[in-house]
Image: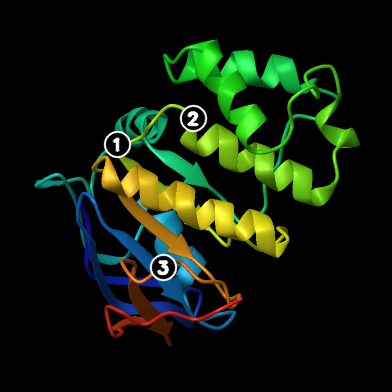
Amino acid sequence: MIEAHDLTKSYGRHAILRGASLKVPPGERVILTGDNGSGKTTLLHVLVGLRRAESGRIVWNGTEISHANRRTWCRMRMAWGFLPQHIAFPSGMPVGRLLRFHARLRNASLEQAHHWLDRVGLAGTEKKHVDALSGGMRQRLGIALTLFFDPMLIIMDEPASSLDPGWRGALAQWTDTHAARGAAVLVTSQLHESWGSNARHAHCVDGRIIEKNHSMEVSF
């Protein structure tokens, strides 16, 4: 379980998080909505250690990690699946080489990585450079690299933004499958995609989190 308790974060005089609290238990998907500037991305960056909160606590599996050092955060991120809103792949790197790198990094099999490359519709692209892929293809590649090693924590920032409706539906099914095996899944979204009736919805407003109806669902 990942938990945020009363997190605050400011940039200069501009407060972004104003006591944000959220819990994502194992086996549950939380869909976090909110307008641009509401604090969604900042919250995710604080949860995975890319930003430091000024106050509040972060708890992972019962252990407070708010004040962990950089090495500890990096080690934890290696075991977590994190997809940022803007994916930056190494320029000029072939897809196949990127797969091999991530398989070694995650201590997972290359076969798993290739399986997910096929699932996201990119089989046969191993010799292509990532620069040659379209925006939607790069997004699907990022999703594959986030999910292929079965992480127990999955955090994705606007993962459906560059996907057409069919792939959005596939993404909803994949996150549901990972939650069913026990992963904690947190996804931010601005689009009107359906995540299924078993997803929990929360809304970020002015740096705070408001829980929504558990069964709330919006359609494509």
**Tag on residue 188?**
none
Q: Is residue 168 above or below residue 70?
A: below
Q: Residue at left 58%, top 36%?
A: 144
Label 2 close to label 3 by CB (< 8 Å) = no
Q: Is residue 156 left or right of residue 141?
A: left
Q: Is residue 102 above or below residue 57?
A: above
The residue that disc 3 covers is 196
The one nearer the camera, 11 or 195, is 195
Q: Nearer the viewer, mark 2 or mark 1?
A: 2
The residue that disc 2 covers is 148
**Labels 2 and 1: the sequence-earlier one:** 1
> Label 2 sits on what residue type?
Phe
Q: Residue at left 86%, top 23%?
A: 128
Q: Position of residue 98 (x, y in %)?
A: 68, 21
**Labels 3 and 1: the sequence-earlier one:** 1
Secondary element under disc 3, as helix, strand or loop, is loop
State how many labels appear: 3
Q: Position of residue 146 (x, y in %)?
A: 51, 38
Specify the quadrant that holds the C terminus: bottom right
